[in-house]
């Protein structure tokens, strides 16, 4: 496993240490790895959502505006996330 040193302001360092103290994380590295995993999932979901919007717009099958389509897709994505969190 590679090592990376990161400098944080005191307030952020304190926050990380408090997260570790909750017992949910073994150490600061575990917390940072979890943050990175969550960020990657968000980025993947954002990319997938954008691809869905692009595909829908390119298909020419809808009468919705780009804004209306994005709102509908975002609603479905948020519902999927809520469903996944409740599972």
Image (tube, grey):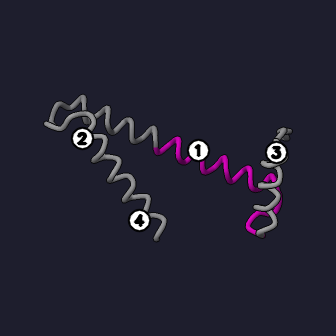
Q: Residue at x 27, y 47 (%)?
A: 72
Q: Quadrant of residue 53?
A: top left
- The stretch drawn in magenta includes residue 80: no
Which badge, 1 or 4, is on the more N-terminal residue?
A: 1
39 left or right, relative to 72: right
Mark sitting on residue 1:
3
Q: Secondary structure at mark 2?
A: helix
Residue, disc 2: 68
Which badge, 2 or 1, is on the more N-terminal residue?
A: 1
Q: Residues within 10 Å of mark 2 (few under 14, many from 20)?
A: few
Residue 23: image x %, image y %? 78, 70
Q: CA distance from mark 2 to mark 4?
A: 23 Å
Q: Secondary structure at mark 4?
A: helix
Front position among marks 2 and 4: 2
Residue, disc 1: 40
Q: CA distance from mark 4 to mark 3?
A: 34 Å
74 left or right, relative to 30: left
Which badge, 4 or 3, is on the more N-terminal residue?
A: 3
Residue, disc 4: 83
């Amino acid at each position: 496993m590679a090592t990376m040193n990161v400098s944080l302001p005191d307030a952020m360092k304190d926050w990380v240490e408090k997260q570790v103290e909750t017992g949910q994380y073994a150490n600061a590295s575990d917390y940072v790895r979890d943050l990175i995993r969550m960020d990657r999932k968000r980025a993947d979901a954002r990319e997938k959502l954008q691809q869905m919007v692009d595909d829908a717009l390119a298909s020419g099958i809808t009468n919705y505006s780009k804004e209306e389509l994005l709102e509908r897709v975002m609603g479905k994505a948020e519902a999927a996330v809520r469903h996944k969190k409740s599972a």
